[in-house]
Image: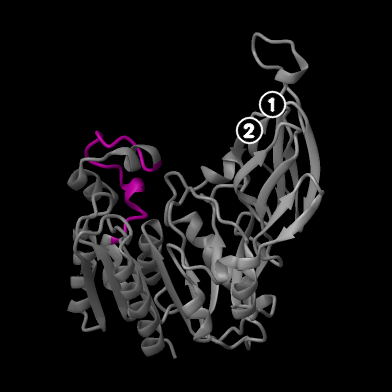
Amino acid sequence: QQQQQQLPGTDAPEAQPQLWVSRICGVWRVTWVCSPTARGLVNGSAALLVPTPTPAKGDASRGTAAGGLGAAEGALCWNSAGQVALAYETDQLWPGVWDGRRQCRVELPQQAAAAQAFASLTVQVVQWSSFDGQAVSGFVYQQAGLAPDAPLLLQAHGGPAIAMACDRSAAANSTRYPLRHLLAAGFRVFLPLYRGTLGFGDAFAAANVRKQGLDDLQDIMLGLDALAAQGLTSRTCSIGVFGGSYGGYLTMRLMTMHPDRFKAGVAMYGFIHGRWMSFETGDFTWENEYSGDSKVWPQPSELQEGDNFPNLHKISSPVLFLHGADDDICPLSQSKVAFNVVRSRNLPTQLVSYPGEKHGFCKPANRTDRDRRTLAWFQKYLP
């Protein structure tokens, strides 16, 4: 699929851009605009239009590649002959390179050992309809052959306005939120792409504005039901939840609003009260964009519906809190208050503060500690 439009003030054919798109769950995602020609490349479940401009001889150009279900990621490069090279992978293929000169995929030698070591780890796309008929999708990561009654971990992604790729390597990589240690331990991981996630059009991305912790929460809960209905999990399997930033907020939100469904949680650098967070940090971007005008007092009650603070007493399962001591986006105080509420209810809980870390964990030693603590927590409290 491609569309041409004339750039203002020009009438030259080479100035007409092409849209590079991929089709995901019935939605055409525009991922990059380039010119002057496009050549179709089919990659797994997504159709990509690979830009092939004709720069001056000897010149090298670069563009931004697409990220999505079965799409290319990273840098896109081409030579003066318009021959493109890009790295890509799918839910079935490990990372490789598309060689535009030879018009074929080139396997990466360094991927062979990783592919063999993690051959049993799989990822697949699942889809369901939400309460209002909205189509929602997500990913399931697991060891091949894992029984439906294996414990399930719901990963609530942060953002919420970020795009997630259905990549084979996502199950094996050591990333911001690695999964491989959890999968190797026998857990199944479910990553729902609730409304507010990027990649499904502007309306979908904006659908949780002033509705955070409300409609997106229903997307997630109905996704859990869909897994059982589709036979991917049993209806009686134990469920835990974890996530960072907005995912940390959702972890607490899910445990407060559905305490009977979640047996344990790990909340990383989340928040419990939007306005409190805004005025403690002095950064009003979040509230102004997602909740409303931060200068309006008193804050309208409908904009406080999604706050976790009034409902923290409903948590009935063990929670581990992990937070950077110098977080200037979601302050440590947010986790401290939640920790003290859970502790006051005589529930197993722990708060770990990492000195020198801001919003997220950058130091390798802290990342290792996070992974070990998260795995140990779920192994201890998720039957």
Say which mark, if any, is on residue 60.
2
Number of residues whose C-alpha sits closer than 10 Å to that of mark 1, classed few (under 14), some (14–19) or many (20 or more): some
N-terminal of the pair, mark 1 or mark 2, is 1
Q: Which amino acid type is shown beneath numbered disc 2?
A: Ala
Question: Residue 22: where, in percent of width, then height?
Answer: 71, 46
Horizontal side of 280 relative to 145 (left or right) equals left
Q: Looking at the image, what colour scheme do you see?
A: one colour
Q: Is residue 139 magenta?
A: no
Q: Which amino acid type is shown beneath numbered disc 1?
A: Pro
Q: Is residue 54 above or below residue 337?
A: above
- Circles 1 and 2, Cβ within 8 Å, touching? The answer is yes
Q: Which residue is mark 1?
A: 55
Say which mark, if any, is on residue 246.
none
For the C terminus, give its image quadrant: bottom left
**Residue 288 appears in the rendering:** yes
**Helix, strand or loop at mark 1:** loop
Look at 65% across and 72% down and name the residue there: 112
**Helix, strand or loop at mark 2:** loop
> Who is closer to the viewer here, 99 or 155?
99
**What secondary structure do most residues of the magenta stretch adopt?**
loop
Image quadrant in which you'd find residue 158: bottom left
> Who is closer to the viewer here, 54 or 326?
54
Look at 26% across and 61% down and name the residue there: 309
Question: Residue 325: where, in percent of width, then height?
Answer: 19, 60
**Residue 1 appears in the rendering:** no
Bounds of the magenta span?
290-308
Horizontal side of 281 relative to 55 (left or right) equals left
Q: Alpha carbon of mark 1 to alpha carbon of mark 2: how far? A: 7 Å
